[in-house]
Amino acid sequence: MSFLTLVKNEAKAIFSNSTIVLAMIGGVLFYAFLYPLPYLNQSPEEQKITVVDMDKSDLSRKFIRMANESQQLNVVEQAESINQAKQQFLDNTVSGFLVIPYDFSANLQLGQAPTVAYAGDASYFLIYGTIIEGLMKAGGTLAAEYRVAHMTIDGTPINTAIDTFQPFKSNYVPVFNHNMGYVQYVVPAVFVLILQQTLLMAVGVRQKASKVSENTMSHLAVRFGIFLFSELILACFYFGAVFNHYDISRFATALELIILLVPFISAVILLGMLLARWLPTPESLLLLVLFSSMPIVFSAGFIWPTELIPSLITDLMHLLPSGFAINGFLKLNQQSAGLPSVLFNISGLYGLCLLYAVLFFISKRNKS
């Protein structure tokens, strides 16, 4: 059989298999536009809350106005009692409720820090944190205004009063995440995992469907080359068109990305072949890939700090291509670190290629 005939037959076997096409191409295209949807607004804003104002003073009403004017909050209701506010929350009319106590203005005028109460569902930590941030900003601003006003009444020049209350000013300049949003932070790392998991499924299904006569060295080499070339195109689509669509920062050159992509994709292909050799059915391989996705995400070190993850788990993650690839792509493409800084990641991926290849041929020889 000629080389061109071998390539033609293998390509036909791969791209005529609906499961492979759905996993490798359909999955990549589907997740490219589905996964970033919850993060398109970058961060939660205008969260609806209700207020129980027991103080009913000018200061409490000013506090409510300041909270409503903040970017994080939208005061849509004012309840007459805590029970009414609680019911509004349980009815999902609002995300939480604020209670301003009777002595709010009195404590503020006495120079004491008044205590306000907020109740909400903390399991939605992004929403909960956004509301708390908005309330703290409003409360801090009100306290500052009142404090500065009293200092000026006592004869302190207004500029001196402001500097005394706020001795320094912060000037935040985002370097890599230019809009401080979740798309820049989460999506690039998860895209690497999507490329890995979808390719693992595609390679595993093809390997399980192949006949004994289709597992010669020439067949395996051609199969490897077709998957490598196809996945490189999909990866370039992710790091190119999709990143541009979502305005995700990209600092690496095309050549730098390919230098890291080649060992990453190669390792995934070899791992897919190895898993297909070890697992009894295509269904078991698909289940393994699907159920391992979430543990891999939370062990990768971009959602939860690596320092707080047990070293045993991080070491195990380096037995997977994503363990080296996610960190490498974030350094190279999102932080403009350059190729020298990811040599460890590249070496690790080539090391995995060697490990998977050796294990594959050992298991292949034992079964033949």
Image (cartoon, grey):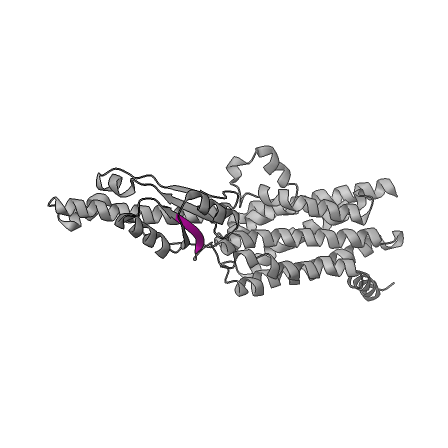
Quarter of the picture containing the C terminus is: top right
Image quadrant in which you'd find residue 29: bottom right
Pick the residue in front: 132 or 19.
132
- In this image, 91 relative to 213: left or right? left
Residue drawn 28% across the image and 38% down it: 113
Q: Main secondary structure of the magenta part?
A: strand
Which percent across, then down, holds residue 106? 25, 40
Which percent across, then down, holds residue 177? 45, 54
Furthest-left residue in view? 155
Image quadrant in which you'd find residue 178: bottom left
Pick the residue in front: 95 or 3.
95
Residue drawn 20% across the image and 44% down it: 164
48 in the magenta segment: yes
- In this image, 253 relative to 157: left or right? right
Which percent across, then down, holds residue 273? 76, 49
Which percent across, then down, holds residue 103? 29, 39
Quarter of the picture containing the N terminus is: bottom right
- In this image, 317 relative to 92: left or right? right
Pick the residue in front: 332 or 147.
147
Count of number-bearing discs: 0
Residue 204 in view = yes
228 in the magenta segment: no
Q: Which residues are magenta?
A: 46-51
